[in-house]
Image (cartoon, rainbow, N blue to C red):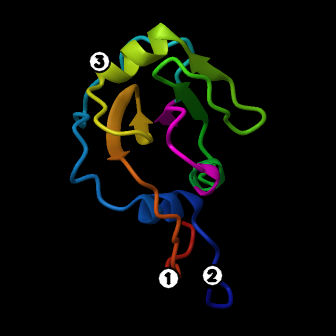
């Protein structure tokens, strides 16, 4: 990273997740009913027990500086980072199905209760060099 440049956590997350081209979740769609109080901007991570090591994904998501919502779908408990309240059970799975999630993990960037961007599938974890400063 160049001297004097700061890492932009949200930009880093967006670059790390890549393009949403394969996502089936509809952009602009309202989130289905959920148990948390919505923030103006937030990140929702929908995952299952068979996602493998999500450490790099959780690291990037938490570094973005937005509230993070963890949704553990498909009925088998899987861990999330300490401090996150995890929504589990049949209602969490129904939430994922209403969104038409096609692969786990799915990361949603939400603004005003609507899906602004969505990424589904494997997280590569390679953030690469960043050339932009935080605004």
Q: Position of residue 34 (x, y in %)?
A: 48, 13
- The part of the chain drawn in magenta is 40-56
Q: Residue furthest bottom?
A: 3
Left or right: residue 20 compared with residue 128: left
Q: CA distance from mark 1 to mark 2?
A: 8 Å
Q: Which label is found at residue 98?
A: 3
Q: Which residue is at 50% across, 38% downward? A: 50
Q: Give the CA separation, mark 1 to mark 3.
A: 37 Å
- When asked about the image quadrant of residue 122, the answer is bottom left
Is residue 44 within the magenta segment? yes
Pointer 2 residue: 5
Q: Earlier in the sequence, mark 1 or mark 2?
A: 2
Q: Residue at x 53, y 82 (%)?
A: 129
Which label belongs to residue 131?
A: 1
**Tag in front: 2 or 3:** 3
Of marks 2 and 3, which one's residue comes earlier in the chain? 2
Residue 99: x and y in percent read 30, 25
Is residue 33 toward the left or the right of residue 100 in the image?
Answer: right
Which residue is depicted at the point 53% across and 26% down? 71
What secondary structure is found at the residue carrying circle 1? loop
Q: For residue 49, which numbered disc appears in the image?
A: none
Is residue 12 positioned above or below 107 on the image? below
> Marks 1 and 2: CB-CB under 8 Å?
yes
Secondary-structure class at tag 2:
loop
Would residue 95 be counted in the magenta stretch? no
Q: Earlier in the sequence, mark 1 or mark 3?
A: 3
């Amino acid at each position: 990273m160049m001297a004097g440049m700061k890492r932009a956590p949200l930009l880093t997350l967006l670059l790390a997740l890549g393009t949403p081209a394969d996502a089936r979740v509809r952009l602009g769609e309202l989130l289905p009913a959920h148990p948390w109080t919505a923030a103006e901007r937030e990140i929702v991570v929908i995952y299952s027990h068979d996602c493998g090591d999500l450490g790099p994904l959780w690291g990037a998501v938490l570094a973005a500086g937005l509230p993070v919502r963890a949704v553990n779908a498909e009925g088998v408990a899987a861990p999330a980072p300490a401090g996150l309240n995890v929504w589990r059970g049949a209602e969490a799975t129904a939430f994922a199905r209403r969104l038409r999630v096609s692969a786990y993990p799915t990361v949603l960037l939400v603004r005003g209760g609507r899906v602004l961007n969505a990424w589904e599938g494997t997280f590569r974890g390679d953030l690469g060099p960043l050339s932009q400063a935080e605004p």
